[in-house]
Image (cartoon, helix red, strand yellow):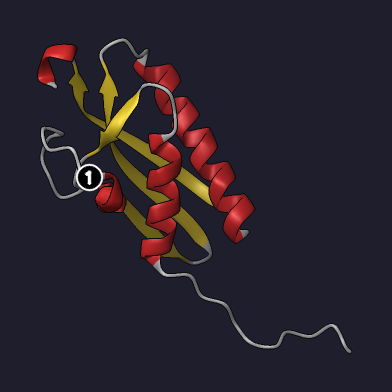
Amino acid sequence: MPDRPLGSVKVANEVIAHIASLTACQVQGIVGMYPAKARDGHRVLPAGSSHKGVRVDLGNDALNLELFVIVDHSAHVPTVAAEVQRQVADAIDKMLGLEVREVNVFVGDVRFPEDS
């Protein structure tokens, strides 16, 4: 059989957002995601809706992501954010074969034990 494309494969933005949010939520120091359209992170999204805390911009073969996260009070924010960026980019590359240009992390809230 010749080595030729048999068609195209397209991945919905929601799938990319799900992968990104599930990966981010596994990083130590991340409490959860908040809605991308919110002005702050006072509303934690349930695990099944965490993809709503990700904006996906896929244009001209460049993937840019914005993740809206809530961090734990004991976390070192720059370290946690860098780990989110690294793990999300790796997961998207491994699962979808898409190169991620940017993973921008927005910290909308810090959770303390008394917030629970």
One can see residue 99 in this view: no
On screen, 44 above or below 8?
above
- Residue at the far top in the pictured view: 74
* Drawn side of residue 45 relative to residue 28, left or right: left
On screen, 110 above or below 47?
above
* Drawn side of residue 63 relative to residue 7, left or right: left
Q: Residue 45 location in percent, x, y?
A: 20, 43
Residue placed at 60% from the left, 82% from the top? Answer: 8
Q: Which residue is mark 1?
A: 46
Q: Tell me how many marks there are.
A: 1
Badge 1 crowding class, 10 Å Cα cut-off, few under 14, some 14 to 19, many 20 or more, is few
Q: Nearer the viewer, residue 61 or 51?
A: 51
Residue placed at 18% from the left, 37% from the top? Answer: 44
Residue placed at 34% from the left, 27% from the top? Answer: 30
On screen, 12 above or below 42?
below
Q: Residue 78 location in percent, x, y?
A: 39, 19
Based on the displayed image, in which of its 4 quarters is residue 16 positioned?
bottom left
* Drawn side of residue 49 relative to residue 3, left or right: left
Q: Quadrant of the C terminus?
A: top left
Q: Nearer the viewer, residue 111 or 59?
A: 111
Q: Residue 7 location in percent, x, y?
A: 64, 87
Q: Secondary structure at mark 1?
A: loop
Q: Residue 92 location in percent, x, y?
A: 54, 51
One can see residue 50 in this view: yes
Based on the displayed image, in which of its 4 quarters is residue 28 positioned?
top left
Tell me the amino acid under the disc marked 1: Pro
Residue placed at 89% from the left, 89% from the top? Answer: 1
